[in-house]
Amino acid sequence: MTGRQFLLLSCLSAMVLLCMLREGTGATVGSRQPAGEETQEDSTQKIFMQESDASNFLRRRSRRSPKSRDEVNAENRQKLRADELRREYYEEQRNEFENFVEEQKDEQEERSREAVEQWRQWHYDGLYPSYLYNRHHI
């Protein structure tokens, strides 16, 4: 019996909570209108403004006061800092690439030297050149 009472009590509290939440959202939104009652003209009025208002807005924006010297200096400092950071980034990338290329070249030279050394060992006939032979025995 206690299990049924617990289940009933939890369902009842969930319903009360949902009803309170629904009423709370309704109160925050204000007067609710059923869907479809709002006319097309009302919705376009909320989104778009009159043409005269728009042209006045744009005209006012074009007559803005010029930027102060401090604003211009701050913008120039930001641009210079961005340029400096960009330059540092590309310089770092170039250095990394140059290091990579140099490492590749060194590895290739090492492989080539090893291959030549192996070839010499393989084809060595046991005879030293005459100038070495003569120098050691003199």
Image (cartoon, rainbow, N blue to C red):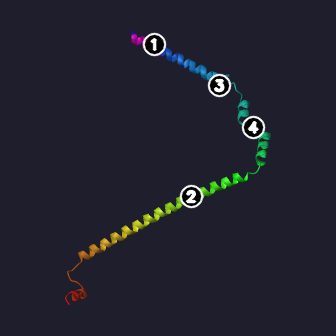
Judged left or right of residue 103, residue 125 is: left
Helix, strand or loop for disc 2: helix
Helix, strand or loop for disc 3: helix
Q: Is residue 5 magenta?
A: yes
C-beta proximity under 8 Å, tags 2 and 4: no
Whichever of labels 3 and 1 marks the residue nearer the N terminus, that label is: 1
Question: Which amino acid type is shown beneath numbered disc 3?
Answer: Val
Furthest-top residue in this view: 1
Q: Is residue 40 magenta?
A: no
Q: Residue 31 at x, y = what percent?
A: 68, 22
Whichever of labels 4 and 3 marks the residue nearer the N terminus, that label is: 3
Task: Please provide the residue range marked out in magenta.
Answer: 2-10
Q: Where 69 falls versus 52 (above or below)?
A: below
Whole-Å distance between the Cαs marked 3 and 2?
49 Å
Judged left or right of residue 13, residue 36 is: right
Q: Nearer the viewer, mark 4 or mark 3?
A: 3
Q: Residue 63 at x, y = what percent?
A: 79, 48
- Can you identify the residue that label 2 sits on? 86
Q: Residue at x 46, y 65 (%)?
A: 98
Whichever of labels 2 and 4 marks the residue nearer the N terminus, that label is: 4
Q: Nearer the viewer, mark 2 or mark 4?
A: 2
Mark seen at residue 29? 3
- Choose between 41 and 63: the one closer to the eye: 63
